[in-house]
Image (cartoon, rainbow, N blue to C red):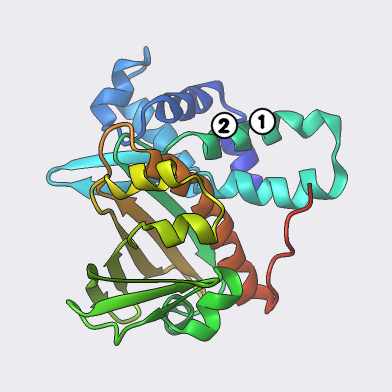
Amino acid sequence: MDEVFKALADPHRRRLLDSLNARNGQTLRELCAGLAMARQSVSKHLAVLEAANLITTRRSGREKLHYLNAEPINAITERWITNYHRARVHALADLKKVLEAKPMSDNAFVYTTYIKTTPETLWHALTDPAFTDRYWGATFDTDWQPGSEMVWHQKDWTSKDPEQVVLEADPYTKLAYTWHTFDPAFAETFGMPASEVAALADEPRSKVTFELEPAGDEVVKLTVVHDGFQPGSALLESISGGWPSILSGLKSLLETGAELPEPTV
């Protein structure tokens, strides 16, 4: 957390975060255009932000795109705001709400977290129903082979569709699959208006990718990319608020052996 607070202490770095909060997935050239700073200086500030895990980067062809990452803010919130509720940190709580309320970009959600575990254990946590049910409440029937169909179970709802498939499965490194189908039974199970779920069903099918990368002694860098959304996607807005909670539960389960408690209102 020291690195996060040091990174946030600089006004230029806060402006870079503001810029990414307004429009995520920018190149270095685009970020430089909004600041009266040399390209080398902006690069140094971005390196500090990336080291603090406040931004994450991905390659798109020859370009390097920068994404705002809300995970460190979530961690600060859970440790300090939840425990003490001090007025002087309400600004961080507001920032957390802003980060989770807005989609991470026009067509993708990108989130990076570091988990004290091994790639093998994390892989099992992503694919084994005994794990997924504990932090997500969802389980999958599949052999986790590329092209295989996935049957999705959550509460009393089951989703089976030929387009609901595993896309990539490189054990301990990368897992990708298409997102589940939306149907009237989903609306009934989760108490959502039928018209709202019908609108989600009309959107293109999105996909989620989990990238696992060793990052030290029994530490794994997990990057989740959920993309394939249409502009103005209601589903993107929805999953942008849901993924941080799911991934916080995953991290808690692997590091402490216990699920996160249900949030209280």
Q: CA distance from mark 2 to mark 1?
A: 6 Å
| Residue at x-position 61% and y-position 35% | 97
Using the image as rendered, state which of residue 63 and residue 154 is in the foreground: 154
| Residue at x-position 43% and y-position 64% | 222
Identify residue type, mark 2: Val
Answer with the quarter of the image where residue 246 lies.
bottom right
In the image, taking residue 237 as reference, residue 91 lies left or right, namely right
Answer with the quarter of the image where residue 115 lies.
bottom right
Residue 9 point in image, percent of width and height = 62, 29
| Dot 2: element | helix
In the image, taking residue 209 as reference, residue 153 lies left or right, namely right
Above or below, 34 against 116 in this view is above
Using the image as rendered, state which of residue 232 and residue 200 is in the foreground: 200
Residue 161 point in image, percent of width and height = 26, 70
Identify residue type, mark 1: Asp
Residue 38 point in image, percent of width and height = 32, 20
Above or below, 79 against 66 in this view is below
Using the image as rendered, state which of residue 39 and residue 132 is in the foreground: 132
Answer with the quarter of the image where residue 37 lies.
top left
Cβ–Cβ below 8 Å for labels 2 and 1? yes
Which residue is under mark 2?
A: 98
Q: Residues within 10 Å of mark 1 (few under 14, many from 20)?
A: few
